[in-house]
Image (tube, helix red, strand yellow):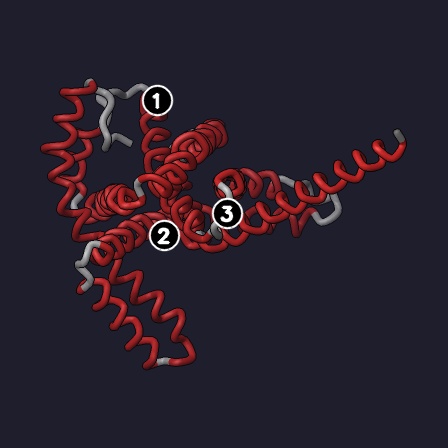
C-alpha cells in the first residue's frame, strides 16, 4: 500500500513538473511574441491619449478604464479565437482582414491631417459622421467607441504578429500564450496612458507642496515643470499617434499588396531604405526604419485621403440607413 502511495506521489510530482514546464514555455513564448509586436504596442500607447484630451479631469481615468476594458474584450473574446481559428481553417483570410483594418487606420490618421490642413471642410465632414448631439455623455460614448475601434485594428495587428512569432505547438499552449500577451500588453499600454494623462494632476499636487516640508522647494519646481511640459507632451503624442496610424496602416497595405503579388511598391520602399542606410552605415538601422516608415506613411496618407469622401458620402449614409442614425463606423 505504501509503495502504491509513493508511486502515486511520484506520478503527481511528475505531472507537476510537466505543468510547470508547460507554464514556463507559455510565459517564454508569450514574452518573445510580445517583443515581436513591440513596435505596434508603442504605436497603440501613442494613439490612445488623444481620445481623452478635451474631457474634464475627473472623466479621464473612467474613460481610459472603459477603453482598456473594450481593448481586453477585443483581444480575448474576438481576436484571440478568431486568430487561432483562422490560422487553422482559413489562413488565406488573415491578410485581407488585416488590410481592411489597415485601410481604416489610414482613414483615421488622414482625417486628422485633413482637419489640420482644411479645418472648414473637415468640420463639414465631421458633421456627417459624428452623432447629432451636444450631450457630453453621448459624445463621451462616441469617443470611447472610436478609441475601441482603433484599438481593435492595432490589437489585431499585435495578435497576428504575436501568433506568427509563436512556435508550432498545441492549440492550448498557443491560446494561453496569446491570452497572456493580450493581458500583459493591455495592462502595460493603458497603465502607461493613465500615467501620462494624469501626470499634470501629479504636477499640480507637487507644486502645492508647502516649503516647510522636506524637499518642498524641489517638489514645487518639479511640479511646475511637469504642469508646463504636459500640454507639449500631449501635443507630441497626438502627432505621433496620428503618424503611427498612418504608417502602420500603410505598412499593412504595403505588405498585403506584396502578399497578393503586387510587390513593386514594397520592393521600391525596401530598396530605397537599404540605399539610404548604406549611405550612412553608422545609422543604417534607424535610417532604414525611417525611410520604410515614411514610404508606408505616404501610401497610407494617399489611401486615407481617398477614403475620406467615400466614408462621408457612401459608407456612413449606408450604415445609418441600415443600422440607425447614431451608430456609424466613422463616428468617434
Inter-mark Cα distance, 2 to 3: 37 Å
Instruction: Choose top left, top right, bottom left or bottom right for residue 128.
Output: top left
Which badge, 2 or 3, comes first in the chain's sequence? 3
Q: Residue at the far right: name it.
A: 2
* Residue in view at x 53 percent, y 42 percent: 173
Q: Secondary structure at mark 3?
A: loop
> Which quarter shows the N terminus?
top right
- Residue under circle 1? 136
- Residue under circle 3? 169
Rendered view: 321 above or below 211: above
Q: Are marks 2 and 3 in contact (CB under 8 Å)?
A: no
Name the mark nearer the viewer: 3 or 1. Answer: 3
Q: Nearer the viewer, residue 51 or 295?
A: 295
Disc 2: CA contacts within 10 A as few (<14), some (14-19) or many (>=20) = some
Name the mark nearer the viewer: 1 or 2. Answer: 2
Q: Nearer the viewer, residue 103 or 218?
A: 103
Inter-mark Cα distance, 1 to 2: 27 Å
Number of dots carrying numbers: 3
- Residue under circle 2? 240
* Residue in view at x 48 percent, y 40 percent: 171
- Residue 206: percent from left, percent from top: 62, 42
Disc 3: CA contacts within 10 A as few (<14), some (14-19) or many (>=20) = few
Rendered view: 128 above or below 167: above
* Residue in view at x 74 percent, y 43 percent: 213
Q: Secondary structure at mark 2?
A: helix
> Which quarter shows the C terminus?
top left
- Residue 259: percent from left, percent from top: 24, 55
Amino acid at each position: 500500500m505504501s509503495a502504491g502511495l509513493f508511486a502515486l506521489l511520484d506520478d503527481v510530482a511528475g505531472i507537476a513538473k510537466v505543468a510547470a514546464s508547460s507554464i514556463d514555455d507559455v510565459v517564454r513564448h508569450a514574452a518573445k511574441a510580445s517583443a515581436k509586436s513591440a513596435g505596434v504596442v508603442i504605436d497603440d500607447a501613442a494613439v490612445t491619449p488623444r481620445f481623452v484630451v478635451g474631457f474634464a479631469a475627473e472623466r479621464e481615468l473612467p474613460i481610459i478604464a472603459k477603453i482598456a476594458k473594450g481593448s481586453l474584450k477585443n483581444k480575448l473574446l474576438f481576436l484571440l479565437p478568431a486568430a487561432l481559428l483562422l490560422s487553422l481553417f482559413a489562413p488565406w483570410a488573415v491578410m485581407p482582414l488585416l488590410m481592411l483594418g489597415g485601410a481604416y487606420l489610414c482613414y483615421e490618421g488622414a482625417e486628422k491631417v485633413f482637419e489640420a490642413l482644411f479645418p472648414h471642410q473637415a468640420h463639414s465632414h465631421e458633421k456627417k459622421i459624428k452623432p447629432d448631439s451636444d450631450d457630453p455623455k453621448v459624445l463621451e460614448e462616441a469617443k470611447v467607441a472610436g478609441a475601441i475601434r482603433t484599438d481593435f485594428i492595432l490589437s489585431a495587428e499585435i495578435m497576428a504578429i504575436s501568433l506568427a512569432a509563436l512556435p508550432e505547438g498545441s492549440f492550448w499552449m498557443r491560446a494561453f500564450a496569446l491570452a497572456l500577451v493580450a493581458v500583459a500588453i493591455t495592462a502595460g499600454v493603458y497603465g502607461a496612458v493613465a500615467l501620462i494623462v494624469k501626470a499634470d494632476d501629479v504636477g499640480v499636487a507637487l507644486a502645492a507642496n508647502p516649503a516647510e516640508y522636506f524637499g518642498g522647494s524641489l517638489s514645487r519646481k518639479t511640479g511646475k515643470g511637469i504642469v508646463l511640459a504636459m500640454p507639449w507632451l500631449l501635443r507630441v503624442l497626438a502627432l505621433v499617434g496620428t503618424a503611427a496610424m498612418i504608417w502602420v496602416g500603410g505598412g499593412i497595405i504595403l505588405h498585403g499588396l506584396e502578399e497578393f503579388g503586387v510587390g513593386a511598391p514594397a520592393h521600391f520602399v525596401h530598396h530605397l531604405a537599404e540605399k539610404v542606410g548604406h549611405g550612412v552605415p553608422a545609422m543604417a538601422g534607424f535610417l532604414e526604419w525611417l525611410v520604410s516608415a515614411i514610404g508606408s506613411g505616404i501610401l497610407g496618407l494617399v489611401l486615407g485621403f481617398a477614403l475620406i469622401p467615400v466614408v462621408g458620402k457612401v459608407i456612413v449614409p449606408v450604415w445609418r440607413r441600415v443600422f440607425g442614425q447614431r451608430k456609424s463606423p466613422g463616428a468617434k
